[in-house]
Image (cartoon, helix red, strand yellow):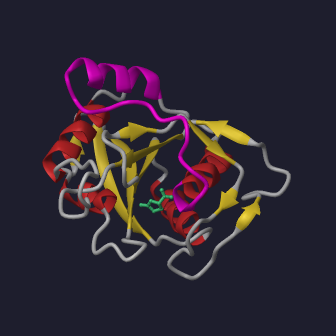
Amino acid sequence: MKHTLLITGFEPFQQEPINPSWEAVAALPSDIGPWHLEKLRLPTVFGQAAELALARAAVLKPQAILSLGQAGGREAVTPEVVAVNLQDARIPDNAGNQPQGDPIVPAGWDGYFTTLPVRSLAQQAAEKGFPCRLSYSAGTYVCNDVFYRLLHHYKPTETRVGFIHVPFLPIQAKEGQPSLSLTQITEVLEFLIGALE
Ligand code: PCA
């Protein structure tokens, strides 16, 4: 029996024509190693994105949930270590919300660590020469919001939760900005998912 992985990517935001996180999810095969992938595109909207993911997860009952997001300016695929209980938006989300230093879950824990073995996964990927390294901040925008809410919901359960930020695609990168091709991004993701037990 295959395990179910709910994998999500975001719609474009901040006037970008595309979001590499969704492009990568869409480009992945439906089955990788022991995992069957269920794909879901999320709105770049505080609260709503996590609600949608949680609703889908309630039906699918996946063994793991992996969310992907765009992190322009990064050079590598970066599995995130920690989510923080903070919404602090430099730009409005796609519904015009721009929280300024608010908690995601009032009285919730300050932070949650991911429940995927990201340290070992990132190390294995780097050893194979893939552009992959750990990140210790998922920011305080919609990606961190989804990551925190999923961990808040699933931390006491067997369902594991992870988040990975991916760089710009070459067509998005302005001069001097780093990027990876869609193939490079999906190769790293396939390796990471395949290595997940
Ligand atoms: N990246 C944003 C939100 C959506 C996305 O792809 C972030 O890093 O918060």
Q: Position of residue 154 (x, y in %)?
A: 62, 45
Please name whichever residue, 158 or 109, is drawn nearer the observer in this view of the structure: 109
Q: In this view, does 27 lie to the left or right of 195?
A: left
Task: Name the one closer to the observer, 130 or 35.
Answer: 130
Q: Is residue 39 visible?
A: yes
Residue 110 magenta-highlighted: no
Q: Position of residue 82 (x, y in %)?
A: 59, 38
Which quadrant is the C terminus positioned in? top left
- Furthest toward the front, the residue is 176
Looking at the image, residue 87 lies above or below residue 189:
below
Residue 156 visible in the snapshot: no
Q: Give the range drawn in magenta.
A: 117-143
Q: Is residue 124 left or right of residue 171?
A: right
Outermost bottom residue: 96
Q: Which residue is drawn at 58% across and 82% down?
A: 96
Q: Is residue 159 left or right of residue 30?
A: right
Q: In which quadrant of the rendered image does the N terminus lie?
A: top left
**Residue appearing at x 14%, y 48% in the figure:** 183
The foreground one among 118 and 180 is 180
Q: Which of 4 and 146 is in front in this view?
A: 146
- Asked if residue 138 is among those painted magenta in the image, a careful observer would answer yes
| Residue drawn at the location 70% of the way across and 54% of the way down | 86
In the displayed structure, would residue 94 be above or below residue 38?
below
Q: Position of residue 196 (x, y in %)?
A: 35, 29
